[in-house]
């Protein structure tokens, strides 16, 4: 099994910054892609950003403000969030596409989520 643990959420004023981290652990052979999704109250979960070995992908609403990066050696993904807006308030979830050793298979995993609140 694989565990994804997010950290770094919290309360920040509009215009502020936060950095989220997600650590993947378990019987991991390879992580193809990792990403961040978010879900605001009363709304569906939506993609924020993803990163694979060769490319990054961002939602239009966060382009130019958020940056996703990855430490492959540590199976960790980061989300640097700048110029935060109240509409960025949501629970942020880490996601990873993982090939595990035992059992030998590829599967998709989610973290438990971390709350980000942007408010004055």
Image (tube, rainbow, N blue to C red):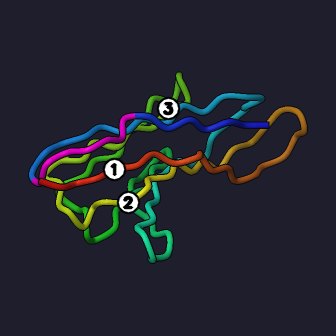
Q: CA distance from mark 1 to mark 2?
A: 6 Å
Q: Is residue 41 magenta?
A: no
Question: Residue under circle 3?
Answer: 76
55 and 18: which one is in front?
18
> Which labelled disc corresponds to residue 78?
none
Task: Classify 10 Å Cα crowding around label 2: few (below 14), some (14-19), many (20 and above).
Answer: many
Which quadrant of the figure contains the N terminus?
top right
> Does the CB distance between marks 3 and 1 fall below 8 Å?
no
Q: How far from the left and from the top, in percent, is residue 65?
A: 18, 55
Q: Residue at x 66, y 28 (%)?
A: 25
> Does the CB distance between marks 1 and 2 fall below 8 Å?
yes
Question: Residue under circle 2?
Answer: 90
Direction from residue 24 to residue 65 in the image, left or right: left
Q: Residue at x 61, y 46 (%)?
A: 32
Vertical relation: 93 (above or below) 28: below
Q: Earlier in the sequence, mark 1 or mark 2?
A: 2
Question: Residue under circle 1?
Answer: 116
Q: Residue at x 46, y 59 (%)?
A: 37
Q: Residue at x 45, y 29 (%)?
A: 71
Which stretch did the figure color magenta?
Answer: 8-14
Circle 2 SS class: strand
Task: Classify 10 Å Cα crowding around label 1: few (below 14), some (14-19), many (20 and above).
Answer: many
Instruction: Locate residue 5: give its quadrant.
Output: top right
Q: Earlier in the sequence, mark 3 or mark 2?
A: 3
């Amino acid at each position: 099994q694989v565990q994804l643990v997010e950290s770094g959420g919290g309360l920040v004023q509009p215009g502020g910054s936060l950095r989220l981290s997600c650590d993947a652990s378990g019987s991991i052979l390879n992580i193809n892609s990792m990403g961040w999704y978010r879900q605001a109250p009363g709304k569906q979960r939506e993609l924020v950003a993803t990163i694979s070995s060769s490319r990054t992908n961002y939602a239009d609403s966060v382009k130019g403000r958020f940056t996703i990066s990855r430490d492959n050696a540590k199976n960790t993904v980061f989300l640097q969030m700048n110029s935060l807006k109240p509409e960025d308030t949501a629970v942020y979830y880490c996601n990873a596409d993982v090939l595990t050793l035992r059992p030998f298979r590829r599967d998709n995993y989610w973290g438990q989520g971390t709350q980000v609140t942007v408010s004055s």
